[in-house]
Image: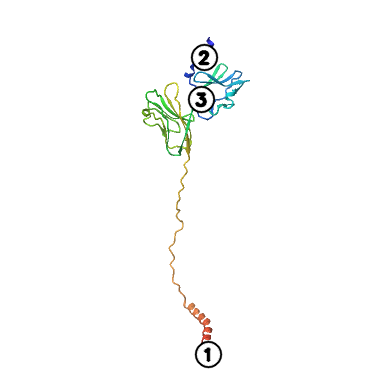
Amino acid sequence: MAWIFLSVLPILLLPFVRGDLVTAALGDTVKLSPQINCGQRTAELIRRLSDHSSVRMAASVDGVLQQVEEYSLRLNISSSGIFLKNVNYNDNGHYEFSCGDNIERIIELKVVFISNISASEGEPRKLPCFSLTQGVDVKFVQWETNGQVVIKVDLSGNVEYGERFTDRVSLPPDWRSVGDLSLILERVQLEDQGEYYCYVQKDSKERGDPAAWRLRVRQERPSIKTFTTPSRHTQRPPAHKEPLCISIPVFIGIIIVILVVSAPLCIWIWMAPSVS
């Protein structure tokens, strides 16, 4: 009877055991674990359902871990790890990796629907998140991105900031009374682009279902301004025009030329009546 109790005990304790938490967006690919080397022992990947039943996802064949037929299209096993593709909401739950009789790793997978939101570089943006905060035992609120803390606030007012987000993020000042846990992000930067998750720790065992956003940041384009460049050349005032002056010798020369040219014509005109 002892062996039966020992085999059933992990299943009974599973709801109270929190493994490594892995969050994935609906439809994405998630890494469940690095590759597990069991040597000569039998390797197995099992998914535990909420009704305490189990589904085998992969088992070792000739010492090599291989996916079962049901997961042949969605489970990718390689030297870099074990990946579950195109996750759906029913993939929520606990995953157990074992070598022989030893459980090597337990993870808890949270699958969430992620919404898209965009912002321009330098502007503020609010990422909504709401939860009950009255009549329940709320320990703290935490926003994460890429597995790193963005901001963590507890009921005592203690605030923890992520390295890149100090003095740029906050929650609404009345979040405890109205249940608005939205992330207020100031001066959005290009490196802020990514997936953000809002968690509410309501007891000491497990975090609540997260709210999720995928933030896209548009790069601000510099405005094109037209500047008038002053001319480097100094404009000179118009030159003063002197009146045209002709010297006396030149004037006499012009008169002589006119007389020489016009004399034959004058003689011909004078003699023309007498000839007729």
Q: What secondary structure is marked by label 1?
A: helix
Q: What secondary structure is marked by label 2?
A: helix
Label 1: how many residues lie within 10 Å, few (<14), some (14-19) or many (20+)? few
| Residue sitting nearer the eye, 132 or 139 | 132
Residue 60: tell me if it is visible.
Answer: yes
Residue 67: tell me if it is visible.
Answer: no
Question: How far apart in space, not on screen, are marks 3 and 2 (Cα)?
Answer: 24 Å
Q: Residue 270: x, y in percent?
A: 51, 87
Read off the residue under disc 3. Answer: 90
Circle on res. 274:
1
Q: Residue 11: x, y in percent?
A: 51, 17
- Where on the picture, by quarter, is residue 203? top left
Q: Residue 258: x, y in percent?
A: 51, 80
The C terminus is located in which quarter? bottom right
Which amino acid, mark 2? Val
Circle on res. 197:
none
Which amino acid, mark 1? Ser
Q: Is residue 202 above or below residue 262?
A: above
> Is label 3 in contact with label 2 (beta carbons under 8 Å)?
no
Q: What secondary structure is marked by label 3?
A: helix
N-terminal of the two: label 2 or label 1? 2
Which amino acid, mark 3? Asn
| Residue sitting nearer the eye, 85 or 106 | 85
N-terminal of the two: label 3 or label 2? 2
Q: Residue at x 53, y 12 (%)?
A: 4
Label 2: how many residues lie within 10 Å, few (<14), some (14-19) or many (20+)? few
